[in-house]
Amino acid sequence: MTHRAFGAARLSLTAALMCGAAMTQAHAEAFNRIASFPVNLNLPEGAEALTETSAEIIDVTADGMTLIYTDSPLGVVGMVDISDPANPQPRGAIMVDGEPTGVAVVGQTAFAGVNTSESYVAPSGYLAVIDVATGALTKSCDLSGQPDSVAAAKDGSFLAVAVENERDEDLNDGEIPQLPAGHVAIVPLTGGAPDCAAMVLADVTGLSAIAPSDPEPEFVDINGLGEIVVTLQENNHLVVLDRTGAVLSHFSAGAVDLENVDTEEEGALTFDGALQAVAREPDSVKWLDDDRFVTANEGDYNGGSRGFTIWSKTGEVLYDSGLSFEYAVAQAGHYPEERSGNKGAEPEGLEVDVFNGATHIFVMSERGSLIGVYADGETPELLQLLPSGIAPEGGVAVPSRGLFVTANEADLGEDGAARSHVMIYQLQDAEPAYPTLVSGMDEAGRPVGWGAISGMVADAETPGRIYAVNDSFYAMQPTIFEIDATQKPARIVRAIRVTREGQPAQKLDLEGVTLDGNGGFWLASEGRSDRLIPHALYHVDAKGEIRREIAFPPELLAGETRFGAEGVTMVGDTLWIAIQREWKDDPKGFVKLLAYDTKSKEWGAVRYPLETPGTGWMGLSEITAHGDAVYIVERDNQIGANAAVKRLYSVPLAQMTPAPLGGELPVVEKTLVRDFIPDLASWGGYIVDKVEGFAIDADGVGYVSTDNDGVDDSSGETFFWSIGPVAGN
C-alpha cells in the first residue's frame, strides 16, 4: 500500500511547527532537562578513561529509583541511581559475557537480551536475568539466535524478545534474504523468574512481501491484553501476535511520497527535493492503548520515511506525520545535513506513557539528537522539543515521578568530544527551556534550515535585533540570519544569502559579522590554505552580495595557521578582527587583535593575553565594540567536566592602538566580565565547547550564542541567551 502523507504533514505542521509561536505561549507544564549523566562514570575500576561506552536501551525499576541501560561496546548492563534525579549517581555495571541489545525491567529484576553470535550465519544469544539490588546474574535462557529488543507484559507474566538474526550489510550489498531467519521468543515468567522450558519461538516467516523467508524482527512491545506487536524493519512489515505466538494480524508498513524534502548532502539545507514510494521501514514501536500503536519510521534497508505513524492493530493508518517532525527538527537547528541523502532526521526511538491523565508520545531523532514530545490524539500535537545527548537510542518514562529519561549512544571521547550520556527531564510547572532559537517557514512552505551559528552583531537602532552568520559547515549556503531576540524562543525572521555575482559564494568560512553603517555588512572569513579558503574580509550589501574582498596582507600570512579570524567589529573606520589562536609569529599564550583601516587601507595589530589552558587549547571566538571597550569571548576547546574557560572579557578602547605588523605589538589588558559556564550548565546538559557569538544591542543588552557544528558529532544544541545589560550601560 502507498499512503500519501501530505495532508497529515500540513495539518501537523500548522499546529506543531508554529514551533516558535507555540512555545511563546504560557505552558501549564513542560519537560525540562535537569541532569546529564556521562556513562563512563560506570567504567570498571582500572579501565582506561577513554574506554568506549554507549548507553543504548534503557528501562527503570518499578519504584522509579534505578535506571538500567545496555552498553554494547563495554559488554555490560549499567545502573544509575536516580533517587535524586537532579544528581544521578553511578551504581556500577554488570558484565554479561556478550553484547547486550535490549532490556526490560519487572519489579527489581532486569531481563537483558545478550548477543553472543560468532558470525552472521551462526547467530546466538541468551536472556540474562539480573537482580538489580545485588547486581547478580541469577539465571539465563538460550534464545536460539541473536536478540534485539526485549519487552515485558504489563502484568509481569511474560516477556517478548525480538530475535533478529541481523543481516550482514557487507554481504551482497546487504540484500536479503540472508538466513537463518529471525523469530520472536515468548518467555513465561513464574514468580518473576523465566520459565525457559516453556519458551515459545513464534514463527514470523512467510508473512512479508519482502524476503518472506528472512524476517528480521527489530522491536517488540506488549499491550494490556497481552498482544505483541513486532516490527520487521528490513521487511517493511508489522505483525501482531498473541502470547502463544499465534499471528493475530500482519500487514505491510507501506510507503509514502515526500515533497519538499532535503535529499542532497551538498553543504546546504534546501528542502526542495522529492522522494517517491519511500518504504516506512519502522524501527521502534509502542502501543498507545490496546487497539493502536505508533511506529518510528527510521528505515534501515531501502527506506525510511522520516516520520512516525499511528496504526490500528488491524493495519489501518490512523495518522502519518509526513515531514512535520523532520521540519520541526530543522526549524530548531538540528537537521543533520550529512544524512539528507539517507534518512534525514532519522526517527528511531519511541516512548509512550501517561502523565497527569494525558498520553504522551516521545519521538527520538537519532541523527538530529532531538526529542519531539507529542500529545496523543487524532492529530497528535507537538508540545515541545527536548535537547538530548548525541544519538538518542532509547527512552523511558517514569510518570510516578514526573520524569523522562533518554539513553544517548554516541561516545566520541577519543575525538575529544562528548561521551555517551543518560539525560533526565522533569515535568515542571514552567515554560520549556529549549529550544532557544528557532526559524520559520519560507514563502514556498519549507523550513528555513540553519545551524553552525558563529559570529553575531546587533542592529544599531532596534533593540533585540541580532544578525548572525553560519560557518563553513554550510559551504554552499553562507548566510546572514536576522534574529528577533524579543521573542521566546528567539526567532530567525530572515535569511540573507551571501552571494558572489548572484550565486552562493564559495570558499568562505564565515566567523564574524559587523555592520558597515550603510545597511550592509563586513564579514570575516577564517581561511584554510589546505582547503583553498582565503583569510579575508568581505564587504557585502544589504542583500548579501559581495562588493569587495580584502585579503590579509603577505606579512601577516607568512605566519598563518588554520585558526584565523573568529570575529570582527568596527570602531570608526577601523575593522578589528579577533584571531582565534597563536600564529607562527606570536609568543605562546598571546594572539593578535588585527586592525584594518578601511580608509587608509593600513593594517596593524595589538596582542591579547590568553588564559593558560589546563587541557587542550585556548583561543578567541568573538570581538564586539561597545561604548568605551571591546568585548572578547575567550574559550578553551573542552566540553563537559573538562570545560574550564568560557568567558567574556573587556579591553579598554583606549588600549586598542594598533602597531604596524612585523614589529613589536602592544599587549592589551583584559577584565573579566562574565563566566558563561554557569549559564551553559543551566540547561542541564554537558557543557558545550563552542561559545562563538556575542552582541550588544541598541539598549546595551548582551546576547550570546553557541555553535552546534551543524549537528556533526554534536548534540545539535544551540544556546542563544541574554546576559542582560552589559556593565557600563
Image: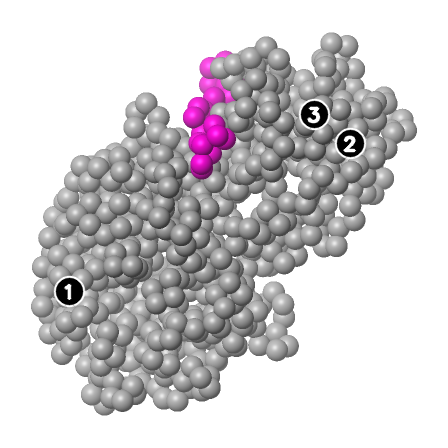
Is residue 210 in sight in this rendering? no
The residue pinned by badge 2 equals 651
Which amino acid type is shown beneath numbered disc 2?
A: Val
Q: Which residues are magenta?
A: 484-503
The residue pinned by badge 1 equals 290
Comes first in the chain, label 1 or label 3? 1
Q: Is residue 513 above or below residue 299?
A: above
Q: Is residue 68 above or below residue 707?
A: below
Q: Position of residue 100 (x, y in %)?
A: 40, 73
Which amino acid type is shown beneath numbered disc 3?
A: Ala
Q: Are marks 2 and 3 in contact (CB under 8 Å)?
A: no
Instruction: Kindly identify the residue that appears in the image at 45 percent across and 45 percent down.
Output: 434
Q: Are marks 1 and 2 in contact (CB under 8 Å)?
A: no
Q: Position of residue 156 (x, y in %)?
A: 25, 79
Q: Is residue 495 magenta?
A: yes
Comes first in the chain, label 1 or label 2? 1
Helix or strand or loop: what does disc 3 sit on? strand
Q: Is residue 593 above or below residue 198?
A: above
Separation of disc 1 and disc 3 at Cα? Answer: 62 Å
Separation of disc 2 and disc 3 at Cα? Answer: 9 Å
Helix or strand or loop: what does disc 2 sit on? strand
The residue pinned by badge 3 equals 625
